[in-house]
Image: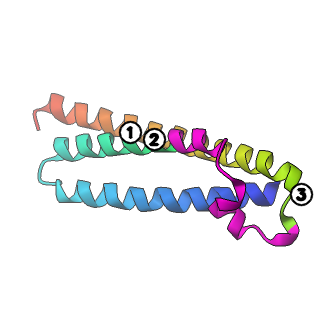
Amino acid sequence: MEEMRRIAFETVQRACLFGTLAIFCTMVGMSFEPRLAFQAGGTMTTLMAGILVYKAREALTKDYRRTEMWLYLPKDLRPPEAHAQWASATVLRETYLIFALWTSAIAIAMWVVALLFSLAGL
């Protein structure tokens, strides 16, 4: 089960890093207007958190054999078929929700920075 958690963490982290790269590039493109850059970053990060929550919900019903985590899991470490759906869904759901929580905290921080820029008149 711990190997499943590690692989799930790596696959979700990689997906989140690609999303973060897109958000960062957009924010750099708007760096001439810091308030706008952080508002856009906060909006897109909030959207990413929403997608992660959706993926956590979807993990409960998605076939375990069609997940990226299952493909990376070595055959000798895979749980028995009767237990695999529950184990895979539980691990993926927990992982998506952890990343959604972290992403939400980052979105809140971006919105606070945008508010501070707005209050400062920038």
**Above/below status of 24 relative to 56:** below
Q: Name the quarter where the C terminus is drawn.
A: top left
Q: Is residue 69 magenta?
A: yes
- Dot 3 alpha-carbon crowd within 10 angstroms: few under 14, some 14 to 19, many 20 or more: few
- The kind of secondary structure the magenta stretch mainly shows is helix
Residue pictured at 64% horizontal, 49% vertical: 62
The front one of 114 and 22 is 22
Residue linked to disc 3: 80
Q: Secondary structure at mark 1?
A: helix
Q: Name the quarter where the N terminus is drawn.
A: bottom right
Asked whether, in this view, residue 88 is left or right of residue 28, the answer is: right
Q: Is the residue under label 2 in contact with that under label 3 (CB below 8 Å)?
A: no
Question: Residue 22 appears in which quarter of the rendering?
Answer: bottom left
Q: Is the residue under label 1 in contact with that under label 2 (CB below 8 Å)?
A: yes
Residue 85: image location, x then y, percent: 77, 49
Residue pictured at 71% horizontal, 60% vertical: 65
Residue linked to disc 1: 46
Residue linked to disc 2: 49
What segment is highlighted magenta in the picture? 53-76
Residue 100: image location, x then y, percent: 52, 41
Residue pictured at 42% horizontal, 41% vertical: 106
The front one of 63 and 78 is 63
What type is the residue that disc 3 sits on? Answer: Pro
Q: Is residue 100 magenta?
A: no
